[in-house]
Amino acid sequence: MSRRLLVHDLGHREYGEVLELQRDLCRRRVAGALATDVLLLVEHQPVITLGRGTRATSLPLPPAELERRGVSVFEVERGGDVTYHGPGQIVGYPILDLREHRQDLHWYLRTLEDGLIQALDALHVEAGRIPGQTGVWTAGRKIASIGVHAKQWVTFHGFALNITTDLSYFDLIVPCGIEQVVMTSVAEELLRSDGEVLWAEAKREVVKGVVQAFGFANSADQDPLW
């Protein structure tokens, strides 16, 4: 069966608003009211999310202090530890029915990683995995974080790829609970300062990478953002 991925670029949105949108789309996909897999792309204001695996040591500052610094804090149902989202980061939320792909969350995670690795390769950043760690890395530095959840095999939550991100925000947390992890971004790795151009290139390559990794039928010669 030929499947297509419906991609929605939401632009700048508050985290809480998009979290509720994800949950609604997931419910609709489970119920059969949404017939197509969806990828939401968004850029958030500074926010820290606490996954089900969050440890107390991963959040050195109390939520009230983070809020005072302008960083929102949300406890969410995804797997994994603490992560950060903010400006300059492409955040992707795939709402995929794995019953139409493969009912295997490990496969899903690895396939998401594959899509991001393909996108980074197209951007001339050599990236890959570190055994035992979820996410995407380049030269030992973490460039993309992944945390997912599924309800009746329909996924939500997703990935965050650092493009022009202010990496100093990661100093507020222990990213993904990994001590002494070094975070990086595409702009940092390529020493590029053309933020708007790089952002547009990266967004297009991320969509292509996800489409190819999951075997969607979206045509490469069409604009996949609609």
Image (cartoon, rainbow, N blue to C red):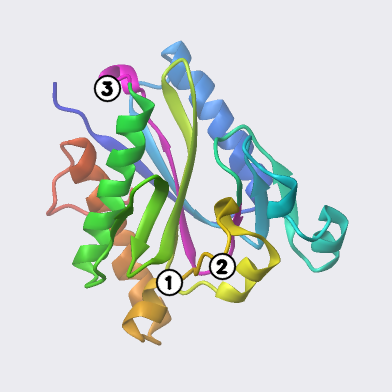
Q: CA distance from mark 3 to mark 1?
A: 31 Å
Which of the 4 image quadrants contains residue 108?
Answer: top left
Residue placed under numbered mark 1 in the picture: 185
- The residue that appears at 86% across and 62% down in the rendered structure is 65
> Can residue 102 be found in the magenta stretch?
yes
Going by the image, does 106 lie left or right of 165?
left
- Residue 206 at x, y = what percent? 30, 56
Q: CA distance from mark 2 to mark 1?
A: 12 Å
The answer, for residue 210, to whether it is visible in the render is yes
The secondary element bearing badge 3 is classed as loop
Q: What amino acid is at disc 2? A: Pro
Check if mark 2's residue and mark 1's residue have beta carbons within 8 Å: no
Check if mark 3's residue and mark 1's residue have beta carbons within 8 Å: no
The secondary element bearing badge 2 is classed as loop
- The residue that appears at 46% across and 74% down in the rendered structure is 164
- Residue 136 at x, y = what percent? 36, 56
Residue extent of the magenta highlight: 83-103
Residue 21's place in the image compared with 74, above or below, is above
Residue 209's place in the image compared with 30, above or below, is below
- Give the camera-side residue of 211 and 65: 65
Q: Earlier in the sequence, mark 3 or mark 1?
A: 3
Closer mark to the observer between disc 2 and disc 3: 3
- Give the camera-side residue of 91 and 83: 83
- Residue 88 at x, y = what percent? 50, 69
Task: Point out the image quarter for the N terminus.
Answer: top left
The secondary element bearing badge 1 is classed as loop
Residue 150's place in the image compared with 10, above or below, is above
The answer, for residue 224, to whether it is visible in the render is no
Residue placed under numbered mark 2 in the picture: 87
Which of the 4 image quadrants contains residue 38?
Answer: top left
Residue placed under numbered mark 3 in the picture: 102
- Give the camera-side residue of 47 and 204: 47
